[in-house]
Amino acid sequence: MSSPAPLRSSTRVRILPTARLPRLARPVGALAAAMVLILGLAACGSDDDNTPPPTPTGCATDTTAGDTKAALLPVPPAKVTLLTAGAEPGAVALSAFDRASAQSAKLVTTSTFASPDGEGATQSATTVDLPMTARVNCTDATDIDLQIGTAGSPDTALNEALKAQNGSRAGMSIGPGVAPISLRILPGEDADDNARQAVEESLVSTFQRSVTLPTEPIGVGATWDAVRTVNAGANVRQTINATLTAREGDQLTIDFTIDESPINSVFRLPDGGTLTIDSYSMTGSGSVVVDLTRGVPVAGQMKISGGRTLVGGDGTQFQQLLGFESNWA
């Protein structure tokens, strides 16, 4: 990883409560422990025998929208700038959701963090396997219902904890460009903090990096930028540069690169304190197949990695290496 130029701004910013912030271990020299993102999850519990309910079919007759028990997690909207329209004839990519049948999908994500050396050096990877059923609402095409199937993980302890997530329910609101603008997760009684955090990080980190489609006509070869501001301890500007590489009916194949850089040099800690961002770099790429009749991608993969160096008021440095991968099938 190349070291980005130091940031000079020291403007303070408000950190949203849904941000995942670092857990800093005792520093050794100029280095410290990795960041652990802190997002609480709420999800439905399951029966005592952990048997998920039957797979739903067709469209959803009810919704998690407005449910007072649901945790609402915003997905920041992206500003899309069409760079080239691509081959003629172009067409606007409008959703045409299938209400006759439910979509079976699977999302597999892996989050990594590490502190590179020193006495407190550590590294970890968390993989979460989330089969799900996605259904559009029977009367509201902007509302997608998600039911989690048999969630799992290669980690034995997490795999056991995830059994309480089987059959849990979530939902998304879809905005212009067929992009999620909010994620709703119902609270659960049986899932522990590790299971809730793992599932929520999997969903939020994936949908916050989703590709927003232009609302103008596009053809194969079209390119566009989608820029949104997300929160990861600091306010981060995320830029996705996308290219439409193929279109077959309602299915669009999109290749993209992703770059995330902080808007200023302030990093806010959970206790209200702040650190200064000395350097920051997160870059990646991916490909996704969007079916305009379905609620979530039908295929795709994305990988982003990098790190940051944070500096405390006493000059102590905290170096963190981060990564995230997602795969749709």
Image (spheres, helix red, strand yellow):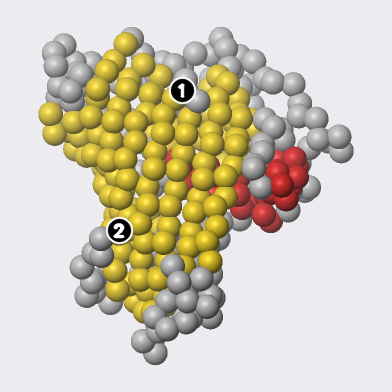
Label placed on residue 298: 1
The answer to which quarter of the image holds residue 2 is bottom left
Q: Give x and y (percent) for residue 229.
A: 33, 53
Is residue 183 something that shows in the picture? Answer: no
Q: Residue at x 64, y 33 (%)?
A: 148
Q: Is residue 285 above or below residue 305?
A: above
Label placed on residue 1: 2
Q: Residue at x 29, y 73 (%)?
A: 278
Q: Residue at x 52, y 78 (%)?
A: 119
Q: Is residue 265 above or below residue 293?
A: below
Nearest the eye: 129 or 2: 2
**Is 44 on the left-hand or right-hand side of 1?**
right
Image quadrant occupied by the N terminus:
bottom left
| Amino acid type, label 1 | Val
| Amino acid type, label 2 | Met
Q: Give x and y (percent) for residue 100.
A: 56, 9
Per the model, the C-alpha gap separating discs 2 and 1 is: 31 Å
Q: Nearer the viewer, mark 2 or mark 1?
A: 2
**Is 277 on the left-hand or right-hand side of 80?**
right
Label placed on residue 94: none
Q: Give x and y (percent) for residue 283.
A: 30, 50
The answer to which quarter of the image holds residue 75 is top left
Q: Secondary structure at mark 2?
A: loop
